[in-house]
């Protein structure tokens, strides 16, 4: 192993170290210390990935690659992991939480660097299994239900993915992601591509494979849901971008992705319309946001990779802030629990209001820039049908975000518990709100960061 | 940079006002007032400088003398977005209106106790974002302010409104944001299809050769956003509710400012960017406008809630503005500009008066009101003034504007001219009904005992003076509007030949 390889693998190594050390500390040491040690891993991984963003890309034979997409993916996954560690509320005896969250981050990092069927599968399964463990930790009925759905549906997804790779292997004798190109258009390969798409759609929570998402969002601890909503999607999006770069069997791939993307946008937004529960609403809205990313990638726009990555990066602070507020309120907060939140707890209320603005894509929030990228990519590709669906989707989306928004400001006379936030949570909320507003007004830093990653 | 100050001073004023009470109680209103007054001073400074130096035409070719001030700097160079602000007489007039109404609403809500800091912030931000709309010539920045403008108005309705305020606020936001999607899509298309990289510079885009077919679609996107904001039937469904449920200051800013941004957009951009598309769609605009003016006036006649009545008169008057703009001749466009200003004065004043009555007796039902002339002579006198303004009595600015639009309509097609005339007749019906019910007759159920206070009378008198001044001495206003009108008319005429 050369020093160059070592540098390329450094994010994975520091994540692994953090997992091992925090796991060893977990039984005896103070819970805060465990969390702190665990947090060092994603922090260092993020730092390394960001510093190496502009460096020339490097294949790490034969399973991984260290290029711009990988580094940006690792940075976003690690940043999300770090943020989620902060508001991960351990159900009582659980000190296992922080190491598991870092393990999930490691899975995301592997996935972002994967260029081989084996690493794709490995990364996906590391994420799924560690999410699963974190989901059952509260040991409530809701969390058990969510975990079962994730386990069973996830297994079906994994099976589809493996079968897809296997069919392609039967044709080409190669398991790297590049193998699809030049694999011809035989029946086997087309079936394989369809199965691969289905497997990825499970992880990306696209319709009709999205059923686990709202349940996970309401049953799992909010930090776990936020990780599943942002980090695993970033990692899967990197895989999708890599696959799009190798000509996939057409028209199966693009048409299929566009079709399930459009279905996700419409169904996700429609099902979110009448959700009284904040986290379930976020679950269906996550399905819709996955759909937006999917249509960007399906459109084949030259801007596609940049737009998809920017979109996910702009989606992250809003979702994380919303889940952090949900964690502070506790349970599954319903509309009624949020009544007049902004007067009871101004920081949490304002952070949630900003997060909703950003998710709805209104200006002066980073979500507006995400919408800008979405529309511009679809216009560039002249994909008018996709554009129309995206516009309908964001119009529908406005309604349910604004219902929650207006509830925050409602006058309310019933005494309700004031949400409890630790100092770290408050700092996270302020940081996320600051990012939403600052990047909404001056998007240059994020745009430049994303562009550094482009080949 | 002074142009930027016109937007930034109210914006930061609002931000500081939001937190001012934490440091020193009851300072929020002072912060808001001072920031708006400073914004007004900046505007006066820019205008004076522009008038005295003959304007700054730097950077915009072939339009020497039209622009009073211009500012260009980078915003997000990575996305091709720049801060391009330009002010001509037309935007100048609207900016004066916006800051003036902002100051007026701050004074009106001086004694507001409920969440006053946020109210002051919302007032300042409404002004700041509308100023952004009136100044931005980078289309993405224009769209940015256009959408952002909805948020403080949404808060005003949702928090300080009456009745079903939350549902109304959501309806307001959804109507306008969905319509805004048309604008956004068109702007993104324009930005990303240039030959020399991404740019949203309206002056560059205006020089582009876009096929008439594409222009028509893009204009449809723009016009959707503008016509919902205007609003013209059938896109007006959000307005009566929003006006009725909004607090008085909210109604004033909605009628005086937000509706004007729609008219501003229609006035400015179709002729500038899409002259071919304008030629295709203008006839439909005329039809919609003439339907709207009759419809608004007729529905106003049937209202019993005074605020709702005034809301429907807004529909009627703004439809006249749409007709004036779509007429595309000098007379009608000048008339449209003047109706915009006049309507801002008269509708704001009527909302203020009705709000003051509501504060006293808790009802706006014109069947229950009455006898103002006996108990409250100041109410009665000012009501009389704005009653004559809303039915376009000669001597008021409203008359001048509508007369010019009708004159222009005769150049276009006598049918539209006669429709506008008919709507003027109907306006006499609803205005007289309102006036007679509220001011004359015996006091019915709700008796107004207390006359207008000086804090209410001051703003009313300012609005009244404006109505009469521009009605009797319109020359200054017309000179200010003239360059923008000429530019628009030239743009349209170039296509027709």
Image: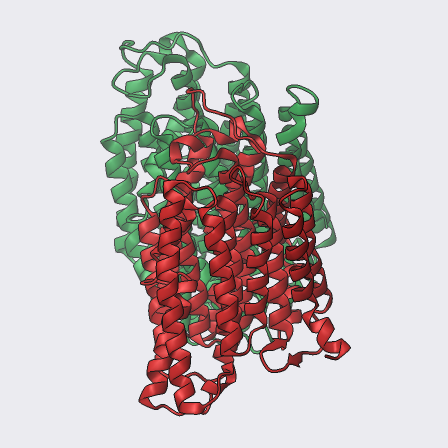
Chain colours: A red, B green
* Residue B111: percent from left, percent from top: 55, 18
What is the residue that sits farthest to the right in this orientation? A3
Q: Give the answer, above or below, for where B344 lies relative to A183.
A: above
For residue B16, what is the image quadrant? top right
For residue A277, what is the image quadrant? top left
Nearest to the observer: residue A12 or residue B171? A12
Is B406 on the left or on the right of B470, as rendered? left
- Residue at image location 44% in from the left, 33% down from the top: A338
* Residue B88: percent from left, percent from top: 60, 53
* Residue B266: percent from left, percent from top: 44, 55
Q: Give the answer, above or below, for where B18 lies relative to A395.
A: above
Nearest to the observer: residue B218 or residue B338? B218
Is B266 on the left or on the right of B281, as rendered? right
- Residue at image location 49% in from the left, 45% down from the top: A222
Res B313 visible: no
Q: Give the answer, above or below, for where A136 lies relative to B356.
A: below
Nearest to the observer: residue B205 or residue A104? A104
* Residue A82: percent from left, percent from top: 62, 51
């Amino acid at each position: 192993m050369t020093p160059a390889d070592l540098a390329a693998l450094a994010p994975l190594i520091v994540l692994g170290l953090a997992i091992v050390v925090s796991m060893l500390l977990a039984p005896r040491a103070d819970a805060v210390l465990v969390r702190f040690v665990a947090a060092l891993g994603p922090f260092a991984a993020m730092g390394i990935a960001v510093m190496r963003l502009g460096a020339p890309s490097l294949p790490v034979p034969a399973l991984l690659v260290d290029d711009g997409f990988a580094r940006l993916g690792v940075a976003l996954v690690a940043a999300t992991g770090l943020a989620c560690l902060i508001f991960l509320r351990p159900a009582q005896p659980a000190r296992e939480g922080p190491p598991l969250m870092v393990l999930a981050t490691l899975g995301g990092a592997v996935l972002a660097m994967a260029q081989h069927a084996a690493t794709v599968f490995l990364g996906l399964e590391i994420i799924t299994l560690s999410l699963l463990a974190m989901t059952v930790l509260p040991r409530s009925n809701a969390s058990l239900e969510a975990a079962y759905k994730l386990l069973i549906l996830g297994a079906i997804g994994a099976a589809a993915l493996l079968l897809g790779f296997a069919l392609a292997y039967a044709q080409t004798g190669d398991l790297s992601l590049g193998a699809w190109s030049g694999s011809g258009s035989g029946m086997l390969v087309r079936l394989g591509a369809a199965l691969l798409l289905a497997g990825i759609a499970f992880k990306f929570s696209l319709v009709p494979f999205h059923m686990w998402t709202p349940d996970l969002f309401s049953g799992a601890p909010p930090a776990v849901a936020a990780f599943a909503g942002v980090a695993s999607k970033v990692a899967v999006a990197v895989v999708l971008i890599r696959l799009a770069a190798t000509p996939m069997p057409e028209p199966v791939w693009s048409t299929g992705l566009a079709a399930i993307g459009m279905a996700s946008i419409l169904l996700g937004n429609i099902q979110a319309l009448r959700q009284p529960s904040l986290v379930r609403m976020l679950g269906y809205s996550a399905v819709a946001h996955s759909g937006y990313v999917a249509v960007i990638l399906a459109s084949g726009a030259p801007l596609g990779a940049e737009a998809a990555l920017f979109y996910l990066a702009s989606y992250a602070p809003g979702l994380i802030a919303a889940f952090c507020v949900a964690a502070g309120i506790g349970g599954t907060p319903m509309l009624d629990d949020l009544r007049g939140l902004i007067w009871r707890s101004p920081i949490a209320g304002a952070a949630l209001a900003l997060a909703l603005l950003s998710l709805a894509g209104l200006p002066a929030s980073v979500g507006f820039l995400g919408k800008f990228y979405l529309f511009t990519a679809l216009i560039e590709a002249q994909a008018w049908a996709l554009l129309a669906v995206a516009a309908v989707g964001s119009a529908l989306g406005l309604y349910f975000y604004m219902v929650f928004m207006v509830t925050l400001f409602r006058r309310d006379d019933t005494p309700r518990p004031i949400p409890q936030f630790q100092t770290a949570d408050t700092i996270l909320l302020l940081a996320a709100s600051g990012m939403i507003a600052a990047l909404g007004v001056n998007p240059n830093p994020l745009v430049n960061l994303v562009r550094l990653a482009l080949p | 940079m002074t142009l930027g100050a016109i937007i930034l001073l109210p914006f930061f004023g609002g931000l500081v006002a939001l937190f001012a009470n934490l440091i020193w109680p009851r300072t929020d209103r002072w912060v808001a007032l001072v920031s708006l007054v400073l914004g007004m001073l900046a505007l006066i400074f820019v205008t004076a400088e522009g008038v005295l130096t003959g304007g700054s035409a730097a950077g915009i070719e072939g339009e020497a003398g039209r622009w009073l001030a211009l500012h260009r700097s980078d915003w997000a160079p990575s996305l091709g977005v720049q801060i391009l602000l330009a002010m001509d007489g037309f935007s100048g007039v609207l900016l004066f209106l916006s800051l003036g109404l902002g100051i007026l609403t701050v004074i009106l809500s001086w004694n507001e106790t409920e969440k006053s800091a946020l109210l002051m912030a919302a007032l300042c931000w409404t002004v700041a974002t509308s100023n952004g709309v009136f100044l931005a010539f980078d289309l993405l920045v224009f769209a940015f302010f256009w959408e952002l403008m909805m948020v403080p108005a949404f808060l005003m309705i949702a928090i300080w409104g009456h009745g079903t305020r939350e549902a109304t606020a959501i309806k307001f936001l959804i109507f306008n944001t969905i319509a805004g999607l048309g604008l956004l899509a068109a702007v993104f298309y324009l930005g990303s299809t240039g030959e020399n990289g991404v740019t949203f510079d309206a002056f560059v885009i205006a020089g582009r050769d876009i096929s008439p077919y594409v222009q028509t679609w893009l204009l449809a996107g723009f016009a959707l956003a503008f016509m919902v904001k205007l609003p013209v039937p059938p896109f007006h469904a959000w307005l009566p509710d929003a006006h009725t449920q909004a607090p008085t200051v909210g109604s004033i800013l909605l009628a005086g400012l937000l509706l004007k941004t729609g008219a501003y957009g229609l006035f400015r951009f179709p002729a500038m960017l899409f002259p071919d598309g304008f030629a295709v769609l203008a006839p439909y605009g005329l039809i919609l406008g003439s339907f709207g003016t009759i419809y608004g006036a007729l529905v106003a006649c049937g209202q019993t809630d005074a605020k709702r009545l005034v809301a429907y008169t807004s529909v009627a008057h703004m439809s006249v503005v749409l007709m004036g703009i779509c007429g595309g001749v000098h007379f009608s466009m000048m008339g449209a500009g003047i109706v915009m200003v006049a309507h801002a004065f008269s509708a704001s004043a009527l909302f203020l008066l009705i709000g003051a009555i509501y504060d006293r007796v808790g009802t706006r039902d014109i069947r229950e009101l009455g006898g103002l002339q006996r108990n409250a002579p100041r109410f009665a006198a000012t009501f009389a003034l704005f009653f004559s303004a809303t039915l376009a009595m000669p001597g008021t600015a409203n008359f001048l504007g509508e007369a010019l639009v009708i004159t222009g309509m005769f150049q276009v097609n006598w049918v539209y001219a006669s429709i506008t005339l008919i709507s003027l007749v109907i306006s006499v019906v609803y205005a007289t009904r309102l006036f007679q019910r509220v001011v004359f007759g015996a006091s019915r159920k709700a008796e107004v005992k207390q006359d207008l206070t000086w804090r209410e009378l001051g703003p009313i008198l300012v609005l009244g003076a404006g109505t009469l001044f521009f009605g009797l001495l319109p020359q200054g206003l017309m000179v200010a509007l003239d360059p923008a009108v000429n530019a628009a008319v030239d743009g349209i005429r170039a296509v027709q030949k």
